[in-house]
Amino acid sequence: MNSSRRQFLSGFAHMLGAATAAELGLLAWSSPAIGDEKMPRMAMPQLAAPKVPLVNPVTLARFVDPLPLPPVAKPVGQRAHPAYPGKRLPLYRMEMRAFTAQLHRDLPPTPLWGYGGTFPGPTVMARRGEPLLIEWANALPEKHFLPIDHNIHGAERDKPEVRTIAHVHGARVSPSSDGYPEEWFAPGRSIVSNYPNAQDAATLWYHDHAMGITRLNIYAGLLGAYLIQDGAERSLKLPEGDCDLPLILCDRLIAKDGQLYYPVSDDPDAPWVSECNGNAILCNGKLYPFLDVEPRRYRLRLINAANTRFYELSLSGGMSFQQIASDQGLLAAPFVRPRVTLYPAERAEVVIDFSGMDGKQVQLRQQAEAIMEFRVRDRGRKDDSTVPSTLRSIERIAAASAVRDRVLTLGEQDDAGGSPMMMMLNGKHWSAPITEDPRQNTTEIWSMVNLTGDAHPMHLHLVRFQVLERRPFDLFAWNESKTLKYTGPAIPPGPEEMGWKDTVRADPGMVTRIIATFEGEPGRYVWHCHLLEHEDNEMMRPFQLLPA
């Protein structure tokens, strides 16, 4: 974090109290629009103090609510689709609607939006090679309950306040079903998307992707898990059934009356803030839940669905995780790690072995704070699950096979005091002509040069990729002459990044290099930072997949 941001947080700490500000970790800046152009403000606006009292989670009783398990989505019928002549595909219906739910036993009900009227939404269970259709139906109110910044591109006042378009994160789909941000639709309408599931077993997730308000719609609750299974994975005899659980992590700020609070700047005409870190960490939509488990192995599918926060997870009592998978499915081999770090949109599948822990409690921690408790029963069923020493074969893509190495910057526009006003990719706005145009079935390296002081989780739609390396570079040389001068050796990815990925952490002062083969249907997709406040305000660009 740079000095201007520390000064900003210091001022906010004076307003709210140092402890509260440190817990929230919030920053703000904005860029009003004039016509189609973004005109930077002369100075970064300050974060407004909340006008309502907020819940301090540490005052709440811990582990009094059971961990909710999202319902499994069920087909509502069958329907033909032109991509599959002569076949009828299972049709699911995901109706987005407003509802209320208690996030903790001792809090009033919280108004939320959710797919199927739940938060998280129903879990979609798909099988490799078995396509399905989902009707995404917008039955939400016409007025948003969170603060829209109409200066942001795509959220102008001439557009409906409430707009949605669903994206299944990590899915290989056609452009028409990918959830392109500008293909939103208003309440009272629905669309049907086609999911071929022609990819390896993996933990994916779905969420809203509407242009300019993604951060608000996801914060409101529009997210859920999408799990692809296949025979090869089933043959490994990993924990399954009720011992295979999605665990979706996110954080919120909650007012004492139960309402969600989303932070705003002190400029009512430009309320956008650059980050939103809530102090209440929710596990499957509950604050400090518990889960009764048997003394056996459990598979947890960890999903970071937060707007901004990264999670550094550990277990109490010196226990470790055995990680078996990352974003796009199984690793080549499991490995033991005491901590799991996930940036927004990243996933990790871990196995926790509770055998020998009969009658004890194990806590899941975010850094030093216990956020969930496992209560191990005195006895349980026989555990026939295993974690094989080899999970699958993953062939590394040779860098020499790439037909192009694109150098792409992650940058920001600063005000006169050096404070960032807007985040951008390759110095271009969303609306600039498309510059990334890989050809179908070719392999490219994307070298992401992070010129900012923040780590950015970068996500490419459509494709899976492998992390090649991270390498420090000379920022001054780049700023002076756009020369990429390395200042140290390449740092290879750790074992958790040696599988297939769709989201990668691009560290400050580093060139993060990934390699991907651009398989899929030609058309228009996007790549972006998955810090949602950045994504909504220009840190997203379209790319065009050209025909082979």
Image: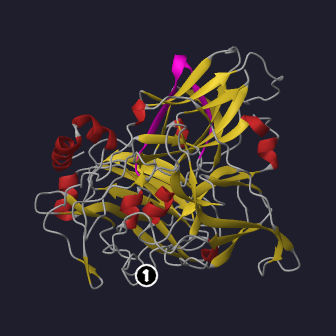
Residue 165: x and y, percent? 56, 71
User: As rendered, which of 483 and 162 lies closer to the eye?
Assistant: 162
- Is 322 magenta? The answer is yes
Whether 358 is drawn above or below 61: the answer is above
Point out residue 524 in the picture as x, y percentages from the top left corner.
Answer: 53, 77
Q: Is residue 366 left or right of residue 21?
A: right
The residue tagged 1 is 159
- Tell me the amino acid under the disc marked 1: Lys
Say if 14 sits above or below 206 in the image. Answer: above
Quadrant placement of the N terminus: top left
Q: Is 112 a magenta residue? A: no
Query: Could you say where residue 240 lies in the image, as x and y percent from the top left?
Result: 77, 38
Which corner quadrant of the image does residue 463 belong to?
A: bottom right
Find the magenta span and give its range: 308-326
Circle 1: element type:
loop
Q: Nearer the viewer, residue 349 or 296?
A: 296
Judge from the rendering whether residue 294 lies leftward or rightward of residue 269; answer left or right.
Answer: right
Q: Is residue 379 above or below residue 414?
A: above
Q: Residues within 10 Å of mark 1 (few under 14, many from 20)?
A: few
Nearer to me, 443 or 189? 189
Q: Is residue 153 left or right of residue 93?
A: left
In the rendered image, which quarter is residue 83 located in?
bottom right
